[in-house]
Amino acid sequence: MADQAPPTAPAVPVPPRAGGPDAADAPGRTARAAPAALAAATCYGLLQAWWALGHAPSFGRFGTDLLVFPAWGSVVLCTGAAVLSRALHTARRPRPRLLAAAAAVAGALLLSCPFLLLDVVGGLLPGLHIPFSLTGFLSRAGCLTVSVLLAAAALGHRRRWWGDCPRCSRTGGPLDPDRRARPPRWALWAAYGAVASCWLRILAQYALGFAGPRRLDTAQAASLAVFEVGFVLAGTVLPLSLVHRWGQVFPGRMPLLGRRRVPRLLLLGPACAISVGLLVYFGVGIGQLVGETVHPVAHDGALPLSFLWVAMPAYWLWGLGLGVAALSYHRRTRPPCRACGR
């Protein structure tokens, strides 16, 4: 039946090979991640170096493409990413320090492009009039690409040297149907915490008087309506779908789709993208907010700090809860490994 978990092959622990695992056992995308990271980091680092030497284009109203580590800072990070990706690819033994360094560099590159969240929202909903620069967007997308490829190279190294299987690095047996159907308690807390954080942000807007009526043209009204509907769905339906049965199998009453499996990427894709976007953008924003609280800076039309100190942590906690719930959903719905059956 459509709502039954697919059969899994019995898992048999694979003893480590003498001399370490064979790279040929790893899937192709894992083996190609490190060379791709090396190429991307080299190209993007050279571009940022050229711009840092005084040849940078205009980035629109934001005035910059990267934050936290702009210009020469990003060049240093790209150099580190290139060196680490090469070292991870050629390592002949487990290198935990390389993994830690790669995670730090990938995280720093990710923190450098928080404006990507605004780029996506502004590009999809132009009626909101969010500042958008194509050059800035492409630069931030390049920075994100280097970060993701370096993280994939680190994951490939981990899969080669840890766990029983060089393809998936999983240990133990497959998840039993009970554990697949019922999320752990921590995932439930994360999902409902994300919902509570979303509603805290909404209530803060009303409580502090920033929800009054505005006169909008047709394009603005349409974009704002789409944004608000998506906002509520991403803060309520999406987190809950990650921890409830109807996030894996469509309810029987739904026409055409009833009792069919929900494609896992239909939920995981938006959940991961929104989670990372909220964590990075509002994580950097909270850091700036701390600075402006300690050393106040006057801004025309700025929102009061009382509102920002409620809204920005609420957004960040929303992203954290959504990400944790997505991690649980990924573990419970991932297909068995084709090599070991786990």
Image: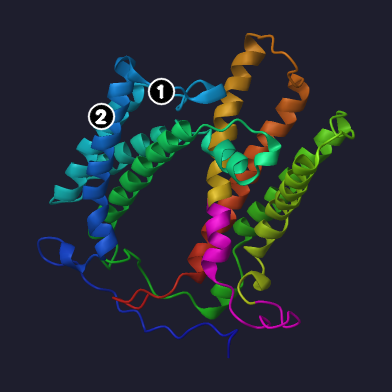
- For the residue labelled by badge 2, is the local secondary structure a helix, a strand or a loop? helix
Can you give x and y, in whole percent of width and height, for residue 307 in the image? 77, 26
The label number, if any, that marks residue 164 in the structure image: none
| Label 1: how many Cα within 10 Å (few below 14, some 14–19, many 20+) | few
- Amino acid type, residue under disc 2 in the picture: Leu
Q: Is residue 270 magenta?
A: yes
Specify whether 261 is left or right of 258. Answer: left
**Quadrant of the rendered structure where residue 210 is?**
top right
Q: Which residue is mark 1?
A: 57
Task: Decide which of 253, 176 is in the foreground and name it.
Answer: 253
- The span from disc 1 to disc 2 (Cα, nearest Å) is 15 Å
Q: Residue at x 53, y 82 (%)?
A: 5
Q: Nearer the viewer, residue 103 or 66?
A: 66
* Magenta span dominant secondary structure: loop
**Is residue 199 visible from the viewing direction of this image?**
yes
* Residue 46 circle label: 2
Residue 58's spot in the image, x, y percent? 46, 22
Which secondary structure lies at badge 1?
A: loop
Residue situated furthest front in the rendering: 218
The image quarter in which residue 135 lies: top left
Along the line of sight, which residue is nearer the eye, 313 or 147?
147
The reply to whether the magenta stretch includes residue 100 is no
Highlighted range, magenta: 250-272
Q: Residue at x 63, y 21 (%)?
A: 289
For image coordinates 36% across by 83% down, the residue present is: 10
Q: Amino acid at mark 1?
A: Pro
How many dots with numbers? 2
Q: Is residue 1 above or below residue 167?
A: below
Q: Quadrant of the N terminus?
A: bottom right
